[in-house]
Amino acid sequence: MNTERMKELGKKRSVIRELFEYGNKRKAEIGAENVFDFSIGNPSVPAPAEFTEKLCRMLSEENPLSLHGYTSAPGDLKARNAIATDLNERFGTAFGAEHLYLTCGAAASLTVSLSALVGKGEEVILFAPFFPEYTVFIETAGGKAVTVPCEWPDFQINFEKLEAALSEKTAAVIINSPNNPSGAVFSEESIVKLSKILRAAEEKFKRKIYLISDEPYRELIYDKKDYPFVTKYYKDSVVCYSWSKSLSLPGERIGYILVSPENEDWREVYAGICGAGRALGFVCAPSLFQHMIPECIKMTSDISVYKKNRDILYDSLTEMGFEAVYPEGAFYLFLKSPEPDANAFCEKAKKYELLIVPSNDFGMTGFVRISYCVLQKQIERSLPSFKKLAEEYFK
């Protein structure tokens, strides 16, 4: 029964949240400075000062009724126009406000999209590693998650296994690039090949297969790497976005769904998005931050801080003997466990007050996630503990 499933979800937190709560308990016991908490992806860089200034000015100058009242269900027209204009300037696309639906963050974007595009018993392909809540969202929509592992060490798509996983039941494929938890960025070559395979599968199975691109880390790409925007490669695509990471606004819950106009049935898809939003109760994204979108559309937080953290952590841990995926984006380091059981490795790390997340819930075994969206001094202070942990394995 669905009610029993909801009770089960409510009683058992995700492994990330469990570790986060454990960290809070340890900090209360021995002091926050003595716990090296790398569990959760909570941005450590503040929103830009200009953003805060504009928000304060808007609150003091605008009519409160217009700021805090309902917008139209798909979102404020001015905000949607601003998003479309920005995307068109950056990626050479031709979007309009009519292709955008504003949401309560990326989680709502995904749940709405899956509810609109996936029928009962249909399958959604995930590339492992993936954000653990994907499976919850898919199953709640009535679908079934099918896992395809990525390649070690660059964590690009394993196309042979993808082709084997595609079937007449495949309704959608989710990609997340830059990836949580690996930090990998899918190359243009990978996106081109993925698009070709999905087009062939659509022809073979005589059905639509939607590509859902989950992009909350899109602005967090380092080393001047280009970003292949999926609508330019695959027409049956939907983009889910959030300002949680790029502007350090995770608690404000503001994002959007973009339906590609290249899809000849985009109006029907968009209608399904609107209907799913209505059915799930997402009838109006937070209005204050909808009104902020035109003011902050060009802004990002100072992501150079994360790049510095990445460089310190990756270089230090690999010098100690650990192996890791080189993170080109996001703010996670995906470390290969030096023993087969990643849970045992994480428990051993707790002896040194190192809180890192085992990979099992991310769809694969043998790795751990380290969130480096923390203060640089925490990373520097944690290195002696990592060194002690390394010495247990690499004597």
Image: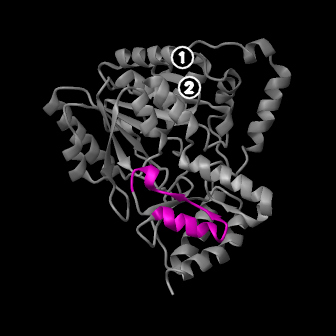
- Write the start and end of the magenta stretch as one range: 342-364
Comparing 63 with 119, the one in front is: 119
User: Residue 95 location, x and y as percent?
Assistant: 45, 26
User: Residue 39 location, x and y as percent?
Assistant: 61, 55
The reply to whether dot 2 and dot 1 touch (C-beta < 8 Å) is no
In this rendering, the answer to whether 340 lies above or below 194 is below
Residue denoted by label 2:
103
Q: Earlier in the sequence, mark 2 or mark 1?
A: 1
In this rendering, the answer to whether 277 lies above or below 393 is above
Comparing 362 with 12, the one in front is: 12
- Residue sticking out furthest to the bottom: 395
Residue denoted by label 1:
74
Gap between marks 2 and 1, in whole Å? Answer: 8 Å
Disc 1 on helix, strand or loop? loop
Residue found at x 54% / y 81%: 392
Confirm whether the magenta stretch covers residue 347. Answer: yes
Quarter containing the N terminus: top left
